[in-house]
Amino acid sequence: DSFYSVSFLRCLDIPKIQCRFLREMISGYSFFHFYPLLFLPMFLKKTEEGTGLIKFAVPVLAALPLAAFGVHMNSIQIIYVFCIPLMNALLKCFSLELRTGGYFLLLLIPPLETGMFTYFIGMPLRLRLTEISCTLLTVFSECRNSGNSLVFRDMVFTVDQVCEGLKFLNISALTVCILERLAAASEMNRLNIFRTVIFTAGSFLWLPANLTRILVLVLSGRNAENVFLHNSAGIFIYSVMILMPLLFFFLIFLGENKVRLELSLPGFPERGKVLLPVLALTVLPFVPSAGTKKMKPWPDSFFGYSRTAGDRNQGTDEIAVAYSRNDAKLIVKRGLNPFRSGHPPRICWNASGFGMREERDEYIKGFGKVRKFILEKGDERYYSAYWYENKDAGYRNGKPDEFGWRFNSAVFGEKHLLFNITAVSEAVLEKRLQEFIQAEIIKIE
């Protein structure tokens, strides 16, 4: 009796566990990140015929272990991607399925626009936007840029993540998807030509729109920290430079035709099938998570280097921490996640206005490889090298490539550290590098 009582009580706890799981997964995102979901009913259609049980079950059984792996690795991107087949299977139980545009719409939802996507596109885009903005602002007054920072009329403006334009790209794509769906539901002539025009326009309009927003904020003397002004300018510029041109094309091609959009209503659920995706989604919150181990505070000194005065990253795991000595600087980072950006040195140095040249990998016998390069900004020149190292290997093991440490961390569970030594000359860099790599095994908890 006690066994059944406990089992029953645990079943009553399932909704609470589900809610906590969902809350943890979407923490850091607001409701407004998920607004594209409001348009999802437009992209649903009735299934023409029932799906056989085997054909129905294969996507669910294939996606479940991959989604569970995302839960274990605390990667909301992986969870999100592989929950889409589970959701689509659930829809099929109610005689509904997603149109092609529906899948694309789901890709517009964070967290896919963040994380690795921002790493590969966001920072290079910010740097380029900073350069273009600086050139345009010189028409009004003297302006100079360093990395992703602008100095205009004695005001410093940082082209940060909120200004990189990916949200403009996101809402442009959403607008295109909605208008294409409305066009497909009409008797529009030249539908394929309209699709070509609107996809081309949507692909390019977001960039000048975002550039205009940066110029408006800088000329108004307000930084992006003014959230109200930043969002108000974004909404107004979207309406004028993206929505109105796309609506203009839509109305021109639509002519006197009418839109006949019919929303598909769900049918009676197939009880035999609905259990499979529901059980799959119910299992995910019970997958054990690797978690994030609480880390010890960073040491004040490290291999002859002292903690840089004024460093604000007290004990954080995701941000690099700086140490220095009279002729060199050391940057260390721990807590690297293979499914997050990781902020490699290239991003940090470029954001600080330094250019990297003569980049090359160098093999060091008994240690591995390091990546060396020269840093330049104006008259400043430094020599630098960085590498990743598995701290639990039991021996020194340098490797500079991004793919290598990410693959080993994801597949084999290796815990990596990032080291970056920068010196005033090539000779000093070589000396400090040899001292460091010949030291005992690095242990940072």
Image (cartoon, helix red, strand yellow):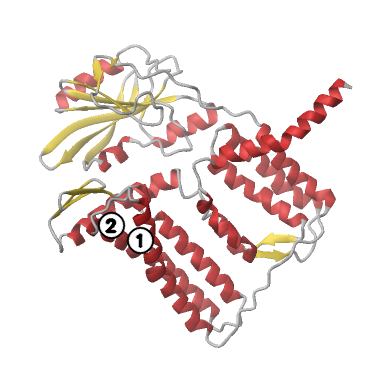
Give the quadrant of the C terminus. Answer: top left
Earlier in the chain: of badge 2 and badge 1, it is 2
Displayed quadrant of residue 204:
bottom left
Task: Specify whether residue 66 is in view.
Answer: no
According to the picture, the residue beneath numbered tag 2 turns out to be 217
- The residue lying furthest to the top in this view is 440
Residue 233: assigned label: 1
Residue 351: assigned label: none
- Where does residue 320 sit, x and y in percent of width and height? 34, 29
10 Å crowding of disc 1: few (<14), some (14-19), many (20+): some
- Where does residue 392 sit, x and y in percent of width and height? 46, 18
User: Residue at position x 45%, y 38% from top?
Assistant: 340
Q: Amino acid at mark 1?
A: Ala
Question: Considering the numbered disc 2 on the image, is that residue within a helix, a strand or a loop?
Answer: helix
Q: Are marks 2 and 1 in contact (CB under 8 Å)?
A: yes
Q: Is residue 379 above or below residue 409?
A: below
Question: Considering the numbered disc 1 on the image, is that residue within a helix, a strand or a loop?
Answer: helix
Q: Nearer the viewer, residue 236 or 188?
A: 236
Q: Is residue 119 left or right of residue 180?
A: left
State how far apart marks 2 and 1 are (Cα): 8 Å
User: Residue at position x 36%, y 48% from top?
Assistant: 161
Q: Is residue 350 left or right of residue 41?
A: left
Give the quadrant of the N terminus. Answer: top right
- The residue lying furthest to the right in this view is 1
Q: Amino acid at mark 2?
A: Leu
Displayed quadrant of residue 132:
bottom left
User: Residue at position x 73%, y 61% from top?
Assistant: 96
Task: Specify whether residue 51 is in view.
Answer: yes
Q: Is residue 241 above or below residue 159?
A: below
- Where does residue 307 sit, x and y in percent of width and height? 26, 20
Q: Is residue 147 above or below residue 198?
A: above
